Image (tube, grey):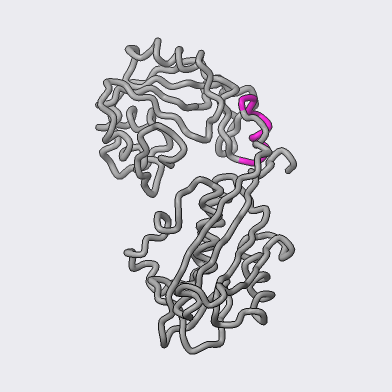
Amino acid sequence: MRGFCDYTVVSGGKSRQQSLKNALEHVTTPFVLVSDIARACIDRELINRLINAKEMADVIVPILSVSDTVVYEGDTIDRDRVKRIQTPQLSKTATLKRALETEEVFTDESSAVVADGGSRHFVEGSEDAHKITYIHDLNKLPCIQPPSSATLVGNGFDVHAFEAGRTMMLGGVMIDVDYGFKAHSDGDVAIHALIDALLGAAGLGDIGMLFPDNDNAYKDIDSKELLKTTVLRLHQFGLTVVNADITIAAETPRLSSYKRAMRQTLAELLHIPAARMNVKATTTEKLGFIGRKEGVGVMATATLNYYDWTQK
């Protein structure tokens, strides 16, 4: 995430509350605003209302009234006494830090502050600060523009030396030879290059950042699992794969009979038709370490588009 913004990026926790506690360790100002990223359209007027009321309580909370009839456990209750709580919420930093020193889980800052004996003051919220929960919520966010139509391109390159006595996996397919690749994982050099191409297109760094080779969690791991994780990460960032192309440079083994299976396997992992996953094989005319049959090199290119949620 540090590659996408100039803000201080803090590791999150397993819950919203733990993530907030992690972030508060870096906050030294007397007041702090906390907002859910799921509320994308926060207008300046709402922020000003919160700041102008900062001295009126330990936590300042934007609210909306309820216009529908409300039934609770079978009984109709006075809707004028029911409020819809929003974020951002402005808190006294020291008060919020103290309120979160508990194992009890709260869904917003004001609940924690009040449970700890603090005071809460309400200000008018904003209908535009709608929380994104379901796909149709996107239609209620006036500040959200349609996704960019830009096509993003990335390239990857990787090499691995041969090692006797290992199983060779290449392009997600087992190759019938009595040697494999020297590597921390299974050494699938084609998938490794492809992952770097995907990450490059997305601006998400490289394979070593996502799957460090000094982490025992990835010792001898099936590289197809690494590719699955990479594709999931892309989807979480709102990106989809358009197509990919890899070139395998190898004097040995001979790969012509494996290319179709590689193409199908990789296409399935990328969630694209096989026609958009190209696999090529070549030699280096006996030049270099590849020509000396010491290893294999792979170049990969991938293109991505932003997921167009307006069409769904």
| Observer-nearest of 28 and 76 | 28
The image quadrant where one finds the C terminus is: top right
In the image: residue 76, left or right of residue 116: right
Task: Give above or below for 233 relative to 59.
Answer: below
Q: What's drawn in magenta, residue-wise?
A: 134-143
User: Toward which corner of the image does residue 112 lie, by quadrant?
Assistant: top left
Q: Is residue 54 above or below residue 299?
A: above
Question: Magenta: predominant secondary structure element?
Answer: helix
Does the stretch in magenta take in 192? no
Residue 159 percent coordinates (x, y): 46, 68
Q: Which part of the image, by quadrant, shows the N terminus?
A: top left
Asked if residue 99 is positioned above or below residue 215 in the image, the reply reads above
Residue pictured at 61% horizontal, 55% vertical: 302
Q: Along the line of sight, which residue is nearer the eye, 57 or 148? A: 148
Q: Quadrant of residue 110?
A: top left
- In the rendered image, residue 46, in percent from the top left (x then y), is placed at 50, 16
Residue 141 sits inside the magenta stretch: yes
Q: Residue at x 56, y 23 (%)?
A: 78
Q: Nearer the viewer, residue 38 or 293?
A: 293
Q: Position of residue 98 (x, y in %)?
A: 25, 32
Q: Is residue 26 above or below residue 63?
A: below
Residue ID at (28%, 33%): 26
39 or 172: nearer the eye? Answer: 172
